[in-house]
Image (cartoon, coloured by chain):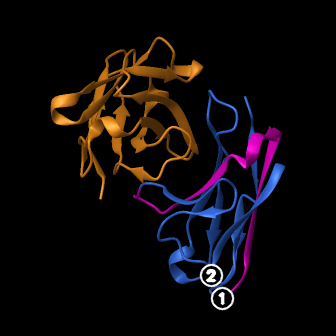
Chain colours: A blue, B orange
Amino acid sequence: EIVLTQSPATLSLSPGDRATLSCGASQSVSSGNLAWYQQKPGLAPRLLIYDASSRATGVPDRFSGSGSGTDFTLTISRLEPEDFAVYYCQQYGSSPPLTFGGGTKVEI
Amino acid sequence: QVQLVQSGAEVKKPGSSVKVSCTASGDTFNNFAISWVRRAPGQGLEWMGEFIPMLGTTKYAQKFQGRVTFIADDATSTAFMVLISLRSDDTAVYYCARGLRFFDIWGQGTMVTVSS
């Protein structure tokens, strides 16, 4: 099972700041099979990025994903008020099981 | 536009079972796969397994083997997740989601509380 470790656990920033979220894998994630999700309180997760760097439909271009192997990054270029949420990475290169990281909370 | 609508919140006793439904609209049910993910209070997301209605095939996370079953009713485009022998640590929000690898459409979630 691939274990995903996200850092930092909490990121305290202000609107307009750049956010850099990291996701490290215990083994190489084949073919960049990694996704990122955003979750707000009381709502279901929302797919942001798949295949490490492809934006899902309707996702603003201030969100970008990069990385390969064991190190992946989600960057939010300029934080908007609606971006304050919890972000999860998820690998699907080695299944079962699909695994999620523990999450990074982006707070004001 | 595909939507997944789940059943309402449940309160269950330890040792009992729960059945959560997930109804698809906007697309033919057999055109996609359904995965189940849960989030316990204060915890992260946890994949439970996947179900391909067209093939009738399932794959369960080892942690839930023997306790979880995925089934479907093609006539109503509804998938079900049945979890038996409930324990307090099964208290969580349970989600259905479209996809086998990553998940682009999610149900709204069903809160299951296990308490004596």
Give amino acid for label 2.
Leu
Task: Residue under label 2, please give it.
Answer: A79
Specify which label sits upstream in the sequence, 2 or 1: 1
Q: Is residue B76 magenta?
A: no
Give amino acid for label 1.
Gly
Q: Is residue A39 magenta?
A: yes
> Looking at the image, which residue sits at the far left?
B75
Q: Is A6 left or right of B93, judged from the image as shown?
A: right
Q: Looking at the picture, does residue B19 appear above or below residue A56?
A: above
Residue at x 47% of width, y 30% of height: B50
Residue B47 in picture, x, y percent from top left? 54, 35
The magenta span reads: A16-43
Residue at x 36% of width, y 46% of height: B109
* Secondary element at image label 1: loop
Residue at x 76% of width, y 40% of height: A30
Q: Looking at the picture, does residue B101 appear above or below residue B82?
A: below
Task: Residue under label 1, please give it.
Answer: A16
Asked whether the residues under the numbered discs 2 and 1 touch, taking CB atoms below 8 Å apart as contact, a structural biologist would say yes
Residue A28 in picture, x, y percent from top left? 83, 40
Quadrant for the C terminus of chain A in the image = bottom right
Q: Looking at the picture, does residue B4 appear above or below residue A1?
A: below
In terms of image quadrants, where is residue A8? bottom right
* Secondary element at image label 2: loop
Quadrant for the N terminus of chain A in the image = top right
> How far is the residue under mark 2 from the one under mark 1?
5 Å
For the residue pair B30 and B90, the one nearer the viewer reads as: B30
